[in-house]
Amino acid sequence: MIITWTRRTALAATAAAAGLGLAPLAGPAAAQTPPGVLVVGQIAEPKALDPAAVTAVNDFRILMNVYDGLVRYRSGTLEVEPALATEWEISEDGTEYTFTLREGVSFHDGSPFDAAAVKFNFDRMLDEEHPYHDTGPFPLAFFFSAIEETEVVDDMTVTFTLNEPYAPFLSNLAYPTGLLVSPAAVEEHGADYGRTPSGTGPFRFVEWQSNQRVVVERNESYWDGAPSLEAVVFRPITDANTRTAEMLAGGIDLMVEVPPVALSEFTGTGDYTVHEQAGPHVWFLILNLREGPFTDQRVRQAANYAIDKEAIVNDVLEGTAEVAAGPTPPAFAWAYNDALEPYPHDPDRARALLAEAGAEGAELTFFVTEGGSGMLDPVAMGTAIQADLEAVGFDVAIETYEWNTFLGEVNPGLEGKADMAEMAWMTNDPDTLPFLALRTEAMPENGGFNSGYYSNPEVDRLLEEARVATDQERRAELYRDMQEIVQEDAPWVFVANWKQNAVTGAGVENFQLEPSFFLLLHDVAKN
């Protein structure tokens, strides 16, 4: 093992003490974390460490350091470059992708990485008859629904045959859904694999103590060079104020998703570095279109007019976001419809629409989360939204949940539970969010994220055509048309597009945020 018994004991003691709030409130110069060990303040406990079982960026931040995919995003971009595959060929009709695999790579458990391992991973995800298929509901398998067959050509060559051209295929392979697990480890641990992961990444799994920490250590034989850090400790600190206090106390070295109101505490001093990076993010409210007042389009539009999104962005989020105009983030500049204007704050228009629909005084149950991936300041935002809706005549009751519990309530659908719910997505392609959350076939009963049950055949048609279009300008035209229809239909309240942030302590070097929203720690060092 890479960490000696003494080091690991000290590391565990440090993490445990910080978790109990025992680290003294001294400045970062008196930080309690040992050199070479990076302690990361996460926003929630991970759900699992199996790429075929998780959907939240909170979990992805760990997974991207334990696993690799066939390809990855080039640093600072969403452009694809080789990883476990060194090269690939695409057939003229766009339905066959043949990958040449990297020689000499092993999983952390010592088993070989080869074409059979690649086939195992995709068969496990897509074949319901596969003995290890059942990892729980996993809507992100949609990313690879175009795969008809995964074929082992030889030990180091694999071919994917698609049922039709699929434009986002390479980008989706670079997403955490495309990370590759050790077949031997899955076979050994079965249903417990999500707590005993084995990948090929720069760090290997050491331990997971529930609600305390996940520890990974340096993979000395990593194919892309051993990382600088000796180990990384991921600590779940759900409360943003507590996470801020831990950062100021030196109990953690890296804090993700800094609350906007806390940013000023880390600026103007040489003790910390604040990092910001724009990316494809949208924060919205899912509206229940199957039952209740939001079955009426006028009421949905009224909610969009009622909420003062400029005030939320400027006052709650301290200017760290922009008002959203629709379902596609402007970070996808090539596909974004910049002719769309956000719904303005117009309470009078909202009241008129409610009166026209006969929905004055409509009672709403509103699901809010304490915190989670890309959720900004969800309790404060939820409270502001509640006040704005009540000001135009809605009667809003908030129910607040811990993040994983919240997902368990929202992802299966809002029917019978709530009229609206907070949600945030960080995506890798203009296809991802609408295809998984706005198509008729993506409703929860079909394994998708369309938790508000929106259905528009024209939107379905545009999305289906866009994902098979090989010409990017044609894809862009289709997505821009989709955005216009969805904005008018208003299945969501479109609130904000966020600029992600993080803060690091003085001893942390070579850290940068990625537009993918992943936390990549291979090049990070710590004194």
Image (cartoon, grey):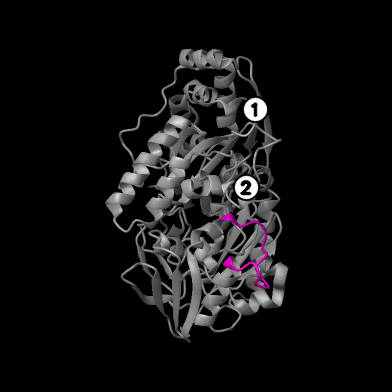
Residue 451 screen position, x and y as percent: 60, 42
Label 1 sits on a secondary structure element that is loop
Label 2 sits on a secondary structure element that is helix
Q: Amino acid under label 1?
A: Gly
Q: Is residue 360 above or below residue 234?
A: above
Q: Quadrant of the N terminus?
A: bottom right
Q: Is residue 183 above or below residue 435?
A: below
Q: Is residue 469 above or below residue 360?
A: below
Q: Residue at x 68, y 52 (%)?
A: 19
Q: Which mark is residue 419?
A: none
Circle 2/circle 1 CB separation < 8 Å:
no
Residue 188 screen position, x and y as percent: 70, 78
Q: Sort mark 2 into few (<14), some (14-19) or many (20+) by Cα contacts within 10 Å.
A: many
Front-lying residue, 390 or 62: 390
Q: Residue at x 66, y 48 (%)?
A: 404
Q: Sort mark 1 into few (<14), some (14-19) or many (20+) by Cα contacts within 10 Å.
A: some
Can residue 413 be spotted in the picture? Answer: yes
Question: Does the magenta stretch mainly form a helix, a strand or a loop?
Answer: loop
Front-lying residue, 52 or 261: 52
Residue 245 on the magenta span: no
Question: How far is mark 2 from mark 1, CA to CA?
Answer: 18 Å
Quarter of the image holding residue 233?
Answer: bottom right
Q: Is residue 421 above or below residue 446?
A: above
Q: Residue at x 56, y 17 (%)?
A: 357
Determine which residue is flagged by label 1: 292
Quarter of the image holding residue 314?
Answer: top left
Can residue 204 be spotted in the picture? Answer: no
Q: Earlier in the sequence, mark 2 or mark 1?
A: 1
Give the extent of the magenta segment. Answer: 126-139
Determine which residue is flagged by label 2: 444
Q: Amino acid under label 2?
A: Pro
